[in-house]
Image: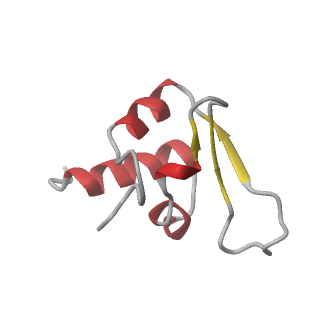
Amino acid sequence: AEPNPERRRYYALLWLTGASQSDAANLTAEQVDWAGGVLRYQRAKLKADAPPATLALGPKLTALLRELPAQGPLFPT
């Protein structure tokens, strides 16, 4: 029912990844490792030396990420 395409994709990313809202909002295209098939990012609520969250790119997440910007923030607004 969400008419805004960027917000609809944002909600889909939250659903597919289980990421927190702030972590998802701060994701960048550079955190997607297409060759390795993973999305890797540092969790905001954890200490800086904590290992990054690493999620495998399944078919649905891959399709969604391909709809998002190829550089910079995945959700610019």
Q: Which residue appears at 56% of the width and 33% of the height?
A: 34
Residue 22 appears left or right of 63:
right
Q: Is residue 60 above or below residue 48?
A: above
Count of all numbered marks drawn on residues in the image:
0
Q: Report the front residue among 74 and 43.
A: 74
State the image coordinates of residue 75 (x, y, percent, origin top left).
Answer: 36, 59
Q: Is residue 62 above or below residue 43?
A: above
Q: Which residue appears at 69% of the width and 75% of the height?
A: 45
Residue 21 appears left or right of 5:
right
State the image coordinates of residue 43 (x, y, percent, origin top left).
Answer: 68, 65
Rendered-image quadrant of the C terminus:
bottom left
Q: How is the image coloured?
A: secondary structure
Q: Which residue appears at 28% of the width and 51% of the height?
A: 8
Residue at the left extreme of this rendering: 3
Residue 15 appears left or right of 68:
right
Q: Report the front residue among 29 and 57.
A: 29
State the image coordinates of residue 11 (x, y, percent, origin top left).
Answer: 38, 53
Q: Which residue appears at 41% of the width and 51% of the height?
A: 71
Q: Is residue 31 above or below residue 75?
A: above
